[in-house]
Image (cartoon, rainbow, N blue to C red):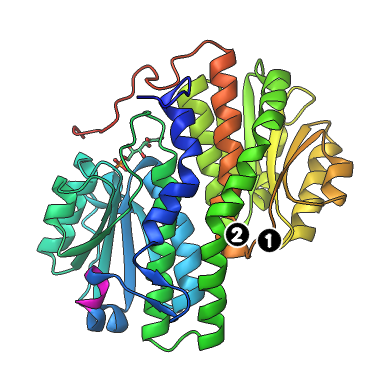
């Protein structure tokens, strides 16, 4: 059942090229230059006229929502807000006519997400579900939706659900942008071509496994980790830290790289590994100067870089390479080595990777 892998988590990490392909297959027609999503097509006027998108989710799904915020605002030029479902539901939230609410949930059973979406529905929002489990409560409660086609995710730590959520939300963003005339035909085509290449690039990113293992060996006994990223990769830093916390029980924090100097920089010393996502297209010079700040305080630097990078390689203690890709799609690649790093650290520390203490696969209580 684990297909020759030692753990479900590792199997699911390796399933990502296929899971992403399954998620866009049948929806994205590259040659024709169209994206078909029944749940969007049936309500296209609502999407065209939406004044705002509000994304509701928890945990890793919330991180996928944050990535989507960056992508959709860039493509569609309407405000996107991303809310923890548990906060939204108890806050007397402002929902206005013309708001579209997107609930993201792998299991489709998360109690807080369910309650938050019901509240939004009562207040008149159109609710769109992005779930992995077909027929789940959230998918049934939504007015419309799009499934991620990740297949069953058994490891408690979410991996392929995250990357397929980002895939669906990218398709959604592209589709709305096109319907609203916010993207040129050639730009739209370019995005489709690029997305079509993602599975093979994820395959390539998975080749970082040995390097991730080597780095895990070096830093597995650290008491703390810091994860930094900017732009599209800021949420990836949060997700990297969450993965490490939940399966290895090592304390980790994710931060936007430039926020470091407003506090967390005080934590940095020679004991502190700092994972920095420093891909070439995303605010690269800014990230390089953030890396220099860490280095001058003797922090240990693990850089997630674009293939062929030399500048960060010179500064960092270790680097992991991912293929070159358009910035907005880079989270689909940069996430991979972070999943592998936390996996190997947890295995080396003898933790129960697939069923970490205190956690359940679906959180059906608030
Ligand atoms: C982290 C993790 C959790 C879930 C969260 C939401 O690896 O698995 O943070 O992402 O409980 O679950 P869903 O997506 O099922 O609503």
> Can residue 184 be seen by looking at this rendering?
no
Magenta stretch secondary structure, dominant = helix
> In x, y percent, where is residue 205?
63, 45
> In x, y percent, where is residue 17?
50, 48
The residue drawn where x is 44% and y is 61% is 68
Location of residue 45 with respect to 350 vertically, above or below: below
> In x, y percent, where is residue 163?
45, 49
> In x, y percent, where is residue 331?
56, 53
Rounded to the nearest angstrom, the CA distance separating label 2 from label 1 is: 7 Å
- Choose top left, top right, bottom left or bottom right for residue 356: top left
Location of residue 47 with respect to 273 vertically, above or below: below
- Check disc 2: other Cα within 10 Å, few if <14, some if 14-19, many if 20+: some
Question: Which span of residues is magenta-colored?
Answer: 39-43
Q: Which residue does the numbered mark 1 point to in the structure image?
A: 282
At mark 2, the secondary structure is: helix
The residue drawn where x is 41% and y is 31% is 157
């Amino acid at each position: 059942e684990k297909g020759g892998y030692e753990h479900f988590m590792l199997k699911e990490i390796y399933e990502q090229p296929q899971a992403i392909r399954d998620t866009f297959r049948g929806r994205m027609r590259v040659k024709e230059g169209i994206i078909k999503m029944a749940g969007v097509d049936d309500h296209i006027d609502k999407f065209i006229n939406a004044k705002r998108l509000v994304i509701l989710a928890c945990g890793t799904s919330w991180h996928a929502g944050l990535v989507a915020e960056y992508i959709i605002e860039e493509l569609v030029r309407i405000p996107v807000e991303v809310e923890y479902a548990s906060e939204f539901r108890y806050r007397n939230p402002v929902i206005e006519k013309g708001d579209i609410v997107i609930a993201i949930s792998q299991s489709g059973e998360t109690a807080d997400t369910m309650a938050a979406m019901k509240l939004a529905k009562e207040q008149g929002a159109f609710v769109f579900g992005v779930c992995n489990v077909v027929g789940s409560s959230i998918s049934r409660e939504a007015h419309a939706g799009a499934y991620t086609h990740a297949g069953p995710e058994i490891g408690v730590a979410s991996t392929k659900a995250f990357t397929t959520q980002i895939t669906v939300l990218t398709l959604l963003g592209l589709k709305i942008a096109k319907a609203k005339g916010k993207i040129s035909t050639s730009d739209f085509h370019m995005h489709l071509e690029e997305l079509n290449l993602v599975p093979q690039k994820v395959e390539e990113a998975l080749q970082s496994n040995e390097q991730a293992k080597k780095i895990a060996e070096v830093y597995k006994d650290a008491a703390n980790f810091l994860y930094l990223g900017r732009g599209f990769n800021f949420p990836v830093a949060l997700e990297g830290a969450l993965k490490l916390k939940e399966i290895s029980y090592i304390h980790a924090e994710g931060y936007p790289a430039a926020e470091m100097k407003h506090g967390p920089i005080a934590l940095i010393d020679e004991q502190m590994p700092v994972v920095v996502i420093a891909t070439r297209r995303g605010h690269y010079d800014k990230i390089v100067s953030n890396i220099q700040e860490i280095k001058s305080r003797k922090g240990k630097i693990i850089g997630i870089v674009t293939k062929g990078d030399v500048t960060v390689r010179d500064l960092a203690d270790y680097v992991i390479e991912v293929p070159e890709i358009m910035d907005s799609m880079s989270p689909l690649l940069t996430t991979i080595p972070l999943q592998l790093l936390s996996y190997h650290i947890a295995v080396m520390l003898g933790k129960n990777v697939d069923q970490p203490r205190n956690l359940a696969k679906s959180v059906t209580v608030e």
